[in-house]
């Protein structure tokens, strides 16, 4: 078939891709072509806009380096990461889930830390937080011997690799659940932070009149063979941008009960001064494939 008019393009491309041997690749390509062509017709994309679109895609790659992944940031800013997460967790989107976005800051090989230990590895100001974690299966039974990575930002809103004042691996740790599926750790209360807006994601944020902040959160990644790897974030309940997260990450199941304690209560450690926080959080792992994601940064 020789193309005569614009309507001919879509069937022509679909036909050309129809011999793709891998059935899943064939399915994805056919749907991509139908939706992409449909989108272009829907908005009557101009040649100038097409040029700009190509520029954005090129900039996503150019802005990405060893410590920053602009493509992950863009996927989050468009709600795509949240959609993929909710479609693939909670019994394939049927039930509530504590699964959430990986985000761009997970690193492999966080330092192994004993339960009850601290993940503060260089002096980091901020109120102390004591976190108790319970891990269960879908039947409510504790999961013992699961690996859990924790990572979060400082009270200034920076992850360690963004901040020369923090030691390598500060506010990161790897724990194992005990026979009751539990572990605990000490850190400082995390803070919300702005996402970088010096690239194409910034253009999107400004064009849509949005702020570029994420509500404060702790990151969790649970891994145990026999269970679907659980990636989670637990958000601070009184954060002012809980409902307007620039990455669309907050769901009801992920709002943590961060309890504030004043200086009159006896803190869990003698060196705690002023106000401090506790968080008691339960996570549920589904049966499935234990697979570590590719780290967005080194
Ligand atoms: Fe984060």
Image: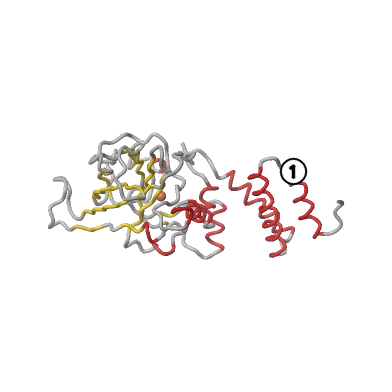
Could you tell me residue 162's position as x and y percent? 42, 43
Q: Quadrant of residue 169?
A: top left
Residue at screen point 25% across, 45% down: 186
Residue occupied by mark 1: 19
Q: How is the image coloured?
A: secondary structure
Residue 167 in the image: state x and y as whole percent: 34, 37
Q: Is residue 153 left or right of residue 298?
A: left
Specify whether 275 is left or right of 103. Answer: left
Q: Nearer the viewer, residue 154 or 113?
A: 113
Q: How many marks?
A: 1
Residue closest to the eye, 117 or 164: 117
Query: What residue is at 13 percent from the left and 45 percent from the top?
Result: 270
Answer few, some or many: residues within 10 Å of disc 1's Cα (few below 14, many 20 plus, some between 14 and 19). few
Q: Secondary structure at mark 1?
A: loop
Task: Indicate the position of residue 96 as horizontal and vertical percent values.
Answer: 41, 58
In the picture shown, does residue 24 fall above or below 237?
A: above
Q: Looking at the picture, how far across and down is residue 190, in whole percent?
A: 32, 51
Front residue of this view, candidates 66 and 34: 34
Residue with the most extreme front position: 139
Tell which of 209 and 76 is nearer to you: 76
The answer to whether the beta carbon of the residue marked 1 is less than 8 Å from any atom of ligand 1 is no
Q: Is residue 201 above or below residue 63?
A: below
150 lies left or right of 76 = left
């Amino acid at each position: 078939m020789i193309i005569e008019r614009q309507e001919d393009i879509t069937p022509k491309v679909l036909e050309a891709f129809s011999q793709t041997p891998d059935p899943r690749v064939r399915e994805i390509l056919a749907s991509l072509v139908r939706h992409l062509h449909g989108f272009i017709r829907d908005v009557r994309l101009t040649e100038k806009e097409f040029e700009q679109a190509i520029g954005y895609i090129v900039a996503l790659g150019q802005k990405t380096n060893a410590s920053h992944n602009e493509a992950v940031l863009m996927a989050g800013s468009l709600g795509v990461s949240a959609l993929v997460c909710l479609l693939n967790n909670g019994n394939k989107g049927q039930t509530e889930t504590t699964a959430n976005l990986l985000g761009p800051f997970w690193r492999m090989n966080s330092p192994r830390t004993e339960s009850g230990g601290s993940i503060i590895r260089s002096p980091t100001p901020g109120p102390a937080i004591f976190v108790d974690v319970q891990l269960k299966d879908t039947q409510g039974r504790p999961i013992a011997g699961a690996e859990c990575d924790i990572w979060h930002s400082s009270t200034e809103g920076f992850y360690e690799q963004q901040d020369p004042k923090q030691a390598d691996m500060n506010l990161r740790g790897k724990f194992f659940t005990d026979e009751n599926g539990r572990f605990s750790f000490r850190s400082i209360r995390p803070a919300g932070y702005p996402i970088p807006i010096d690239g194409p994601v910034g253009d999107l944020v400004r064009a849509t009149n949005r702020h570029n902040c994420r509500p404060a959160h702790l990151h969790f990644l649970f891994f145990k063979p026999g269970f679907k790897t659980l990636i989670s974030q637990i958000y601070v309940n009184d954060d002012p941008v809980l409902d307007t997260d620039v990455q669309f990450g907050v769901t009801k199941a992920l709002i943590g009960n961060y309890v504030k304690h004043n200086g009159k209560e006896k803190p869990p450690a003698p060196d705690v001064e002023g106000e401090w926080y506790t968080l008691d959080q339960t996570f549920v792992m589904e049966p499935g494939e234990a697979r570590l994601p590719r780290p967005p940064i080194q």
